[in-house]
Image (spheres, helix red, strand yellow):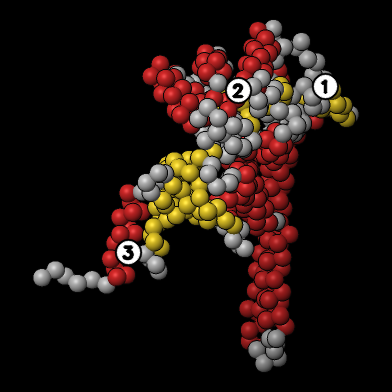
Amino acid sequence: MNKKITVTDLLSAIANTLDETFSSICVEGEIKGLTQSASKHWYFSITDPNSSLSCALFFMNAARNPIIKTLKDGDQVILTGSINLYKVRGNLQLIVSSVKKIGKGDFFEEFEKLKNKLKVEGLFDEDHKKVIPAYPTNVVIITSEKGAAITDFINVFKRRSQFMNLLLIPALVQGEEAPLSIRVAMQKVLRLVDEKKMPVDVVVLMRGGGSIEDLWAFNDELLARDIYHFPLPIISAVGHQIDFTICDFVADKRAETPSAAAEILTENQVNLLNRLNNLRDTLKRNMDNTCLFYKNKLAKCDPSKTIGLFWECINTFKKRLERLDVIKNIWEITKVAEKIIFLDDLHSRLSQSMDGWLRQKNNQLSMLEAKLNSLDPKKVLERGYSMVIDSNQQVISSVKQFEKGDISKPYELHFVDGSSKVYRKSDQ
C-alpha cells in the first residue's frame, strides 16, 4: 500500500522540484489579460496556440522593466523568470524578472544568431581579453553627454577616486547612427594616443538601461569587431544587471551598470586608501605609546624627586630625634652625640655624592642635547641647504620622486629663515 501524504506535503515537494528545475527560464509567447493591481503588481497570461501560463510581474521587477507599461494584449514577448507553485490553490505561475518585446525583425533571434557567430569565431575568448589596469590614471568614457549614465558614473567617481582623470568623448548611444558614432569615438581615442596628446589606460562604453530596441546599437557586428581589435582595454557598461549586449561579450570586462564600472575602476584606490588609513592609525598609536614610555622613564630620573626622597628620610630621622627625652636617657647622651656626628657625616657624604651624581647626569644631558642639535634639520638648513615638501607633507628625497609629483599642486621649499611655495614646471 502506498504511503499517504497530505496535500500540503505533496504540493511542497512539487514546488521544491520546480524551484530546482525551473529557477531561471526564458519563455516566448503572446500576452493575454494584462492587468495592474492596486499595489502596482502586474498579472497576465502568456499563451501559444495550444497552452496558457499564468504570470506575475511584481512591483520591484516592474520598476526595472518599464516596457510593461507599453505592452498590450496580443504582443509577442520573451519573459525571463522562475516557475512558482501557489500552494493555496495549487496553481502554477511564472514569476517574471525580465520582459523583452519581440518587435520588428525579431530582435532576440537576430541577437542569438550574431552572438553564436562571433562566439564561434573566437571574439568572446577569455585569453584574448586584456587586463584592466589596477590603478588607471586616465580613463576615456564614450557615451551621450546628456544621459543619466554619465551622471551616475561621475557621482561614484567623485566619491571614491583619488587620482583618476576622466575624458568624455560624446557619441550617440541609440538609433541607427549610434554604432558608427561609437566607432568614430573609438578612433578619436586612438588618435589621442598616437599623437601623444594623452595616455589612455582604459576606455568605458556606457549607456543607461532600456528596451532591447534602445540597446540595439551595442549589438552591431562592426562595432563588436572594432572592440575585439581595439588595442586598449575596454569596459562595457550598458543597461542594467539583466541586460546583455554583444559588446558585453566582446569587451575585456562587463560592468552591470555605469555606476558599477566606476566602482570597478576605483576599487583598488579605495582599498589602498583604507590600508593607508589603517597604517597611519597604527603608526600614530605606536608613536604615542613610545612617547609615553620614555616620558615616564624620564620622569623617574628627575633629580628633584630623588633629592626629595632623601629629605623625607632626613626629616623622618629628625622627628624621631625630637621625640627623644634626653633627661630620661642621660646615660645615652654620649651615644646620641655619636649618632649626630655620624648623621652629619652621612649628610656631608650624601651631599658630595649627590653633587657628583648631578654633575654626571648634567654631562649626559649635555651630550644628548649636542646629539639632538646635530640631528636638527634647521642646523642643516643653516649651512645653505633647503628641504622640499610636497602637498601631502612628505619630504621629497629623490629626483624620481619629485618628477612623479602632481604638477597642479605646490611644493614647499624650506630655508633656515622660512619657506616658500613653488610649482613644478610641466615636462611638455
Q: Residue at x 61, y 23 (%)?
A: 203
Which x, y percent locates residue 399?
Answer: 69, 16
Label 1 amino acid?
Tyr
Q: Are marks 3 and 2 in contact (CB under 8 Å)?
A: no
In the depicted view, which residue is nearer to us: 84 or 323? 84
- Nearest the viewer among 330 and 168 is 168
Instruction: Give the left or right position of residue 125, taking residue 361 as reference.
Output: left
Residue at (58%, 50%) from the top-left corner? 62
The residue lying furthest to the top in this view is: 195
Q: Which residue is mark 1?
A: 423
**Camera-side residue of 284 and 214:** 214
Q: Which residue is mark 2?
A: 202
Callout 2: 10 Å neighbours few (<14), some, many (20+)?
A: many
User: Residue 31 bears which disc, if any?
Assistant: none
Identify the secondary structure beneath mark 2.
strand
Q: Residues within 10 Å of mark 1 (few under 14, many from 20)?
A: few
- Asked whether residue 84 is in view, the answer is yes
- To which quarter of the image does residue 380 belong? top right
**CA gap, disc 1 to disc 2?**
29 Å
Quick one: label 1 or label 2, which is nearer the N terminus? 2
Q: Residues within 10 Å of mark 3 (few under 14, many from 20)?
A: some
| CA distance for labels 1 and 3 | 73 Å
Dot 1 or dot 3: first in sequence order is 3
Question: Farthest bottom residue?
Answer: 328
Which numbered marker is on residue 12?
3
